[in-house]
Image (cartoon, helix red, strand yellow):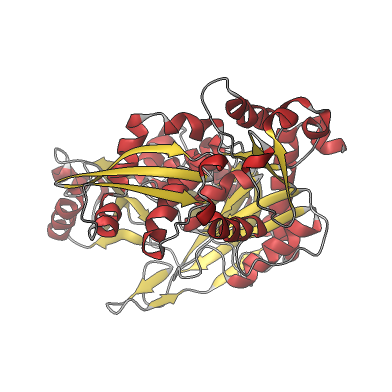
Amino acid sequence: MPVLIVVSDLRQWPLEIPGVRVIDARSYLTQPEFSDLRGVKVFNLCRSYRYQTLGYYVSLLAEARGHKPLPSVTSIQDLKNQAVVRLVSEELEELIEKSLAPIQSDRFRLSIYFGRNLAKRYDRLASHLFNLLPVPLLRAQFVRDKQWQLRGLSAIAASEVPESHYPFLLDVATQHFSGRVGRVRRRTRTRYDLAILCNSGDPEPPSDEKALQRFAKAGESMGLAVERIARDDYARLAEFDALFLRETTAVNHFTYRFARRGVAEGLVVIDDPESIVRCANKVFLAELLARQNLPTPATMVVHRDNVGSVADTLGVPCVLKRPDSAFSLGVSKVESEEELLGETKRLLEDSDLVVAQEYLPTTFDWRIGVLDRRPLYACKYHMAPNHWQIVRRDQNGDRRYGRVETLPVELAPARAVRVALKAANYVGDGLYGVDVKQSGNRFFVIEVNDNPNIESGVEDAVLKEELYRRIMSVFLRRIEQRKGWHAIHD
């Protein structure tokens, strides 16, 4: 993807960076050469971003042209919003206090160049501020009144960078434009950029290393440049055309902020933020499935006023679920009424509502993968040995899993696929894993999961490489639809 640095005056950027072209704002706005470019990253370093100035229009028209501006118009508006400044200050309160504690004065100004500061001890704070408000050259003003607080944020014009900072700025800018260390060199010509958010340190990642490699291979075979990103790459989202979350998601979590930011920047996002919200809360799913008359085990939404009726309604044993439970965590089976009352009381300390569900003993659960409102794969997740769930955790944190059988979707029970598809379609059109229990000839939807596992040798056991190609093809089609006719026919 070509890179442009746009400045108010060419004399304001005396640095030469390999592979980067520097132009003045008026040329970018008026010359057809630039308006006709496709897939361009635009780094707007103009003197001012005030409304209707040249700097403002550079970011505005870059978005209209399908370019990737940094800062975006949204970030420009956020710079002037004191409510945003307060939110940033609150979110980084501990980091600000820790980073600035040694400073003797009551005022401090931090210059941030592409998420970095000349003093290494401020790098972490600079990186977090850049992630929350991605502006290439950013100045943060802090004041101390009992404790340090962020008082203001503003852009630094290229002309305001001291000459003594040029070597450092050249170094960090070159690193930023060349991509992350360890980035895989592209072997094929690509048209679009897709980011996969993942965490190599996750003990239970939704996709293992081999699966991630297969996603990249499938994407690149159809013109998608696939790059893995991590939590610290939040500020880089605008550089991409699509975002694929392969990190365990939650609402009160940075993965949700990535999804929200991706949508705001116009990216194709899976998991989209609405799917994360809906799938992350078992109370929502219980209400949704009941209203759509989908078959589920007998279910109650439990609160402080109806705790006493759970045993009479569902019987014991029954299953209690924390609203944000995932991967069998936060889900417990209670064997007696006394245990039911104790566990419910504990769960209600953290949430005003809890889900209780009839216990249906089975030797396996069906997991039907759904993408773009179509079934993708079918698995039998068998229960862990001597356990009622598919994973058994001991007190040391060790895990034992039940075996998995993957079948062609066509050979899975039609009714299981049908109810799974209906349930997923009520949530959205993303990528879901629907858990279905089979009791005799009846099938019951247990839950719809966003961010379902796709691991090598498991969910891909039948389709193999084709599974990854199907998922990447959905990204490609949605990107092309979003880009419009020109993107398809260039």
* Residue 461 visible in this rendered orientation of the protein: yes
Q: Residue furthest right?
A: 489
Q: Which x, y percent locates residue 22?
A: 71, 44
Asked where in the image residue 104 lies, by quadrant, the reply is bottom left
Q: Which x, y percent locates residue 393?
A: 34, 73
Q: Nearer the viewer, residue 400 or 439?
A: 400
Q: Nearer the viewer, residue 341 or 115?
A: 115
Q: Is residue 79 above or below residue 186?
A: above
| Screen quadrant of the C terminus | top right
Residue drawn at the location 67% of the way across and 27% of the way down: 61
Q: Is residue 455 left or right of residue 273?
A: right
* Residue 450 visible in this rendered orientation of the protein: no
Q: Residue furthest top?
A: 52
Q: Which x, y percent locates residue 110?
A: 38, 49
Residue drawn at the location 68% of the way across and 52% of the way down: 471
Residue drawn at the location 69% of the way across and 46% of the way down: 475
Q: Is residue 143 above or below residue 204?
A: above
